[in-house]
Image (cartoon, rainbow, N blue to C red):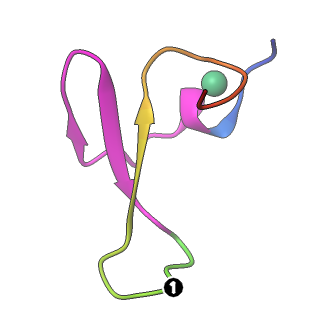
Amino acid sequence: MGICFFCTTNKRVLKNDLAFALFDEFPVSKGHMIFATKRHVKTFF
Ligand SMILES: [Zn+2]
């Protein structure tokens, strides 16, 4: 698997040992955030 946006972004505002969060650049509602795992995986499932 290649490097993706979530692996390289420096816009992380919250994090713990397993995951991190960042604000959506194109939010559907004010304050919308994206949570992602630190581990690079192909799909959520
Ligand atoms: Zn990745």
Residue at the outermost front position: 45
Q: Residue at x 21, y 15 (%)?
A: 17
Q: As rendered, which of 34 and 2 lies closer to the eye? A: 34
Q: As rendered, which of 14 and 37 lies closer to the eye? A: 37
Tell me: 6 left or right of 20.
right
**Count of marks, rendered view:** 1
Q: Would you identify the image quadrant in which residue 3 lies?
A: top right
The quarter of the image holding the N terminus is top right
Q: Residues within 10 Å of mark 1 (few under 14, many from 20)?
A: few
Q: What is the three-letter code of the residue carrying label 1?
A: Val
Q: Position of residue 29 (x, y in %)?
A: 41, 87
The residue segment tinted magenta is 6-24
The quarter of the image holding the C terminus is top right
Q: Is residue 32 above or below residue 44?
A: below
Q: Is residue 18 above or below residue 44?
A: above
Q: Residue at x 29, y 18 (%)?
A: 18
Q: Position of residue 42 (x, y in %)?
A: 72, 22
Q: Is residue 12 magenta?
A: yes
Residue annotated with mark 1: 28
Q: Would you identify the image quadrant in which residue 35 lies?
A: top left
Q: Would you say the beta carbon of the disc 1 residue lies within 8 angstroms of ligand 1?
A: no
Residue at the outermost right position: 1
Q: Position of residue 37 (x, y in %)?
A: 43, 27
Q: Residue at x 44, y 37 (%)?
A: 36
Q: Position of residue 24 (x, y in %)?
A: 47, 67
Q: Residue at x 18, y 25 (%)?
A: 16
Q: As rendered, which of 3 and 44 lies closer to the eye? A: 44
Tell me: 29 left or right of 41.
left
SS under mark 1: loop
The quadrant where ligand 1 appears is top right
Q: Is residue 36 above or below residue 28?
A: above
Q: Would you identify the image quadrant in which residue 44 lies?
A: top right
